[in-house]
Image (spheres, rainbow, N blue to C red):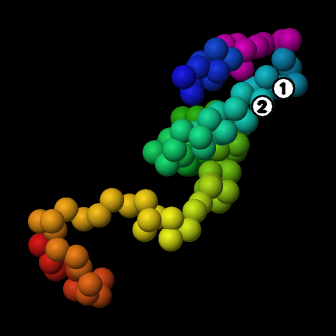
Amino acid sequence: MLFVPLAVTAPFAFLAGAWDAAGVWRSRWGDLLLHTLMLAGPAFMKWGQWAAARPDIVPQDLALKLETLHMDAPTHSQVRTVHEAPPLPAHIPALNCPLSLRLFVA
């Protein structure tokens, strides 16, 4: 349901032609795309970051809007991450050693 507004308004953004010479529909659609990706979660924001880095595939005006995801992506604290992260399964030991040693633990 989250992506329905994008799908419904995409024809207006890409096929507007002469009646949208100023690019208003496309600009607003790009804003809608940006906000939808932010609401959809980290995987979709990562896709938006990738798309922003590929102006050879994604139209340049949309790539510029999606560049916002590189620096202005929503964040949260490490405390929240630790609180919401699931505990390690019993068969995986907790690694309380330096990172350099963790690289060699199988």
Q: Main secondary structure of the magenta part?
A: helix
Label 2: how many residues lie within 10 Å, few (<14), some (14-19) or many (20+)? some
- Is residue 85 left or right of 74 when viewed as pictured? left
The residue lying toward the viewer, choosing from 21 and 79, is 79
- Identify the image quadrant of residue 85: bottom left
Marks 2 and 1 close (CB-CB < 8 Å): yes
The residue lying toward the viewer, choosing from 18 and 67, is 67
Q: Is residue 90 above or below residue 100?
A: above
x 73%, y 36%: residue: 31
Q: Which residue is mark 2?
A: 27
Asked if the stretch drawn in magenta spans residue 23, the answer is: no
- Identify the image quadrant of residue 73: bottom right
- Is residue 55 left or right of 21 when viewed as pictured? left
Secondary element at image label 1 = helix
Secondary element at image label 2 = helix
- Identify the image quadrant of residue 4: top right
Disc 1 marks which amino acid?
Answer: Val
Can residue 55 be seen in this snapshot? Answer: no
- Is residue 81 left or right of 52 when viewed as pictured? left
Give the percent coordinates (x, y) of residue 61: 71, 37
Give the percent coordinates (x, y) of residue 58: 58, 35
Disc 2 marks which amino acid?
Answer: Ser
Asked if the stretch drawn in magenta spans residue 11, the answer is: yes
The residue lying toward the viewer, choosing from 21 and 29, is 29
Label 1: how many residues lie within 10 Å, few (<14), some (14-19) or many (20+)? few
The part of the chain drawn in magenta is 10-19
Give the percent coordinates (x, y) of residue 26: 75, 26
x 43%, y 68%: residue: 82
The residue lying toward the viewer, choosing from 85 and 21, is 85
Between the residue at mark 2 and the residue at mark 1, the CA separation in whole angstroms equals 5 Å
Which label sits on residue 24?
A: 1
